Image: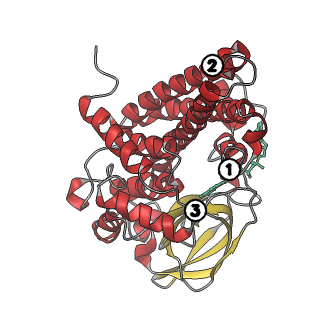
Amino acid sequence: MPLIESEEHKALREAVASFARNHPRTTTGADNRHFWQEAAKLGYIGVNLPEAYGGGGGGITELSLVLEEMGAAGNPLLMMIVSPAICGTVISRFGTEAQKREWLPALADGSRLMAFGITEPDAGSNSHRITTTARRDGGDWLLTGRKVFVSGVDIADATLIVGRTEDARTGKLKPCLFIVPRDAEGFQRRPIDMELTSVEKQFELVLDDVRLPADALVGGGPSHAFGSGGEDAGLLQLFAGLNPERIMTAAFAIGMGRHALARAVEYARERIVWKVPIGAHQAIAHPLAQAHIELEMARLMMQKAAHLCDAGDDIGAGEAANMAKYAAGEACVKAVDQAVHTLGGNGLTREYGLAQLITAARVSRIAPVSREMILNYVSHQTLGLPKSY
Ligand SMILES: Cc1cc2nc3c(=O)[nH]c(=O)nc-3n(C[C@H](O)[C@H](O)[C@H](O)COP(=O)(O)OP(=O)(O)OC[C@H]3O[C@@H](n4cnc5c(N)ncnc54)[C@H](O)[C@@H]3O)c2cc1C
């Protein structure tokens, strides 16, 4: 029977847990940057990136383990879902040699970060409806469109933008990915006033004829975008980023759920209002036990998805990653809810820090793909049920 987690993985888990626990809680952008760079120095941020480009040579298995432990210590780095997981994977698998050399060592050593923008105001969950479009202008590209809820654009050196190009032969719009530098002319960002306590902000983006050189297109020159030689390259690139994104969101959710549960258990062991600690009452103990079981089950699914992803089984990983994200989002929301309840009035004080997790936990139910869209996926792809849309 193969081990679910090797001795090396257990050691990595312990090392990250102790590093994140001993690091003060990050509350400002500067703290966050410092924590990111310290984590990168220890090889945690680029653990999944290829060794030849300065990474650790591991996979999403290791990267998700790192993020889960940071979250469990109350110190998660949201941008790990984006920079090394989505952008690092897409560039490692599909970038040109020059793109790999420019970005991978810097993403691994923490000196640069990359955001990822796919969501559009008029498309939402229906990414077939995205309209951000690139057209040729001499040797350059001009990119125009709008994005919404894109995380960390201000702290990222560039954003990987999902757009579309027109196929020269068929006129059909095909997805393609562009690396857009933060300060590119015509690339505007406006922070969205979110009800979230997080150092990473979400942005609305307007791209107004953003001029990009030919090599801003992931995977290379125009031949790819126009179909000769690299037919549907953009779609493959996009899919390569989605499984890591879902697995990492699961890790984020499981870490947060574990953190909330640990705070609640600690409190329930000590708080006495009758003769015994409140944790002795089954009405308090059982929901905490259930939360623990559900987080463990979600983690098992996440580990399966990560192993399939690292083994190159993109289809198998697709189903497992969706299920893991669903299970982790639900387990996280329930664990946080029960943790807040366990603390009674203290659950809503700033001092104990749990109430702010109520909104944070909901993110994993909504993004990067909502609970309902995963249920749709499983209904159609796994169970073969007909579609309503
Ligand atoms: C904190 C945060 C960070 C984010 N970071 C990023 C980022 O970095 N980059 C990025 O590109 N995006 C990001 N997003 C966006 C996120 O991926 C989207 O919010 C998500 O995909 C849902 O899209 P929407 O908000 O437009 O909801 P909608 O698509 O409008 O959906 C609204 C509701 O309708 C339901 N629904 C829609 N279609 C169906 C259907 N066919 N059947 C049943 N129910 C349906 C949904 O489940 C949902 O409950 C972030 C969002 C948040 C909240």
Determine the CA span between mark 1 and mark 2.
Answer: 26 Å
Question: What amino acid type should be assigned to the residue bearing mark 2?
Answer: Gln
Residue at figure coordinates x 68%, y 40% from the top left: 365
Colouring convention used in this rendered image of the protein: secondary structure
Give the foreground label among 1 and 3: 1
Q: Position of residue 145 (x, y in %)?
A: 67, 71
In-image side of 124 versus 313 (left or right)? right
| Location of residue 210 (image quadrant) | bottom right
Residue marked by disc 2: 290
Question: What amino acid type should be assigned to the residue bearing mark 1?
Answer: Glu
Residue 353 visible in this rendered orientation of the protein = yes
In-image side of 357 versus 84 (left or right)? right
Residue at figure coordinates x 43%, y 61% from the top left: 35
Residue 75 vertical placement versus 273 (above, below): below
Q: Position of residue 168 (x, y in %)?
A: 54, 67
Q: Residues within 10 Å of mark 1 (few under 14, many from 20)?
A: few
Q: Earlier in the sequence, mark 1 or mark 3?
A: 3
Q: Which element type, helix, strand or loop, lies under badge 1?
A: loop
Res 351 label: 1
CB atoms at circles 1 and 2 under 8 Å apart? no
Residue 236 vertical placement versus 136 (above, below): above
Q: Earlier in the sequence, mark 2 or mark 3?
A: 3
| Location of residue 377 (image quadrant) | top right
| Location of residue 83 (image quadrant) | bottom left
Give the foreground label among 2 and 3: 3
Question: What amino acid type should be assigned to the residue bearing mark 3?
Answer: Thr
| Number of numbered discs overlaid on the protein picture | 3
Q: Earlier in the sequence, mark 1 or mark 2?
A: 2
Cβ of disc 3 within 8 Å of ligand 1?
Answer: no
Q: Position of residue 5 (x, y in %)?
A: 32, 27
